[in-house]
Image: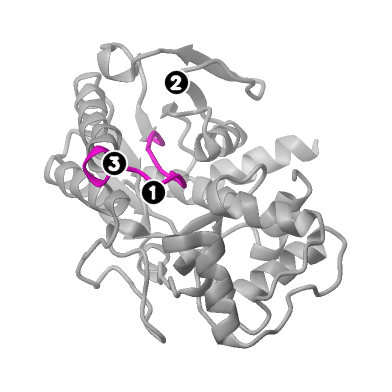
């Protein structure tokens, strides 16, 4: 009875829409959570990915080794979401090769998938982008919102912005297109830099970041999935930054991770100069991911749709740490 009640409430929040929804990249970090959220909301889910994976009951799986060479990805779908993307490349790459690789997936394939969706009769389409399409870092006290002129400062962000602009230019009445731009995501079995950070907390590793006073935005992947369904149900169009909480320092996040792993405060305070030297030695050019600012404001999306995040950031951290 409880599960049925939750489904009814979810469907009510989405305006009683029950649709067939294709999720591209359904076996990824965002795609898996979106499949679960869509099933819970009562939708019929077509989950598409390049490789096989375990799914929740009710999800129909479609395995396509080459998403760019398949004409029937969408079947009879009403809506679609593209979660496919290249990100979290921590190894050093040749700049030209890196740009080519990012554009191939984040731009070229994204445009092709949207074109296929339009031909298949999909009426609403959401593309999962990133705040990096605007900028990956912010200055002290600066908070980026949808009024900020995009100036991506990394190859990844450039490829995301190019895709966003091309997709939005193709928005038509027959298929509305929205590009959602979340910040760094927290959730079960995290990826990228967050995964390394969470593993350190899971082992109770003391880190010298207790005195860092930066401001970084994070978002629960569960909330991104919920916001995506809201974007579809409302038929929003254009690019939106989406956030679910106020920016926090990296030290605060690590303390929350430690708490979720059952440890006390092991975020040590050390002189800033020593910390910068240590971070540069350990992370190189990516030290800004630890010490820099990356603060974003997604209030425009919330104001236009009435969306409210269903999961607190503390609960998201606890859920994440339980999977490390």
What secondary structure is marked by label 1? helix
Tell how many labels. Answer: 3
In the image, is residue 121 part of the stretch drawn in magenta?
no
Query: Magenta stretch mostly in which secondary structure?
Result: loop
Residue position for label 2: 48
Say whether disc 2 or disc 1 marks the residue closer to the N-terminus. Answer: 2
Tell me the CA gap for discs 2 and 1: 20 Å
Q: Nearer the viewer, mark 3 or mark 1?
A: 3
Q: What percent of the width, then of the height, locates residue 1?
A: 80, 35
Cα distance, mark 3 to mark 1?
31 Å
Q: Nearer the viewer, residue 296 or 169?
A: 296
Tag 2 secondary structure = strand
Q: Residue at x 60, y 72 (%)?
A: 250
Of the pair 133 and 15, the residue shown nearer to us: 133
Residue 231's disc number: 1
Whether residue 308 is visible to the viewer of this picture, yes or no, is no
| Range drawn in magenta | 82-98
Q: Is residue 224 left or right of residue 270?
A: left
Q: Secondary structure at mark 3?
A: helix
The residue under the point 46% across, 74% down is 292
Residue 288 visible somewhere in the drawing: yes
Which residue is under mark 3?
A: 98
Q: Sequence-wise, which precedes: disc 3 or disc 2?
A: 2
Which label sits on residue 10?
A: none
Q: Badges 3 and 1: C-beta atoms under 8 Å apart?
A: no
């Amino acid at each position: 009875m409880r599960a049925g009640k939750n489904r009814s409430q979810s469907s009510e929040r989405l305006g009683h829409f029950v649709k067939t929804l294709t999720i591209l990249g359904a076996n990824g970090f965002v795609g898996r959570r979106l499949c679960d959220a869509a099933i819970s909301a009562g939708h019929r889910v077509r989950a598409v990915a390049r490789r096989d994976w375990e799914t929740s009951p009710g999800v129909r799986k479609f395995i396509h080794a080459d998403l760019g060479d398949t004409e029937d990805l969408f079947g009879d779908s009403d809506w679609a979401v593209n979660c496919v993307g290249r990100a979290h490349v921590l190894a050093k790459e040749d700049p030209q090769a890196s740009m080519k690789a990012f554009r191939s997936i984040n731009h070229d394939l994204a445009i092709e998938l949207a074109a296929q969706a339009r031909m298949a009769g999909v009426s609403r389409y959401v593309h999962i982008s990133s705040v990096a399409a605007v900028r990956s870092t912010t200055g002290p006290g600066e908070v980026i919102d949808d009024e900020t002129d995009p100036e991506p400062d990394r190859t990844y962000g450039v490829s995301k912005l190019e895709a966003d602009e091309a997709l939005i230019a193709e928005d038509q009445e027959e298929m509305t297109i929205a590009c959602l731009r979340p910040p760094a995501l927290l959730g079960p079995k995290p990826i990228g830099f967050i995964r390394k950070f969470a593993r350190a907390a899971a082992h109770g590793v003391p880190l010298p970041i207790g005195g860092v006073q930066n401001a970084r935005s994070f978002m629960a992947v569960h909330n991104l999935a919920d916001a995506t369904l809201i974007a579809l149900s409302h038929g929003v169009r254009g690019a939106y930054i989406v956030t679910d909480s106020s920016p926090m320092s990296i030290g605060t996040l690590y303390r929350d991770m430690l708490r979720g792993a059952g440890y006390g405060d092991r975020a040590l305070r050390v002189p800033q100069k020593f910390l910068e030297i240590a971070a540069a030695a350990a992370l190189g050019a990516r030290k800004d991911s630890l010490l820099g600012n990356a603060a974003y404001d997604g209030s425009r999306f919330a104001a236009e749709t009435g969306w409210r995040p269903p999961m607190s950031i503390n609960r998201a951290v606890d859920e994440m740490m339980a999977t490390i």
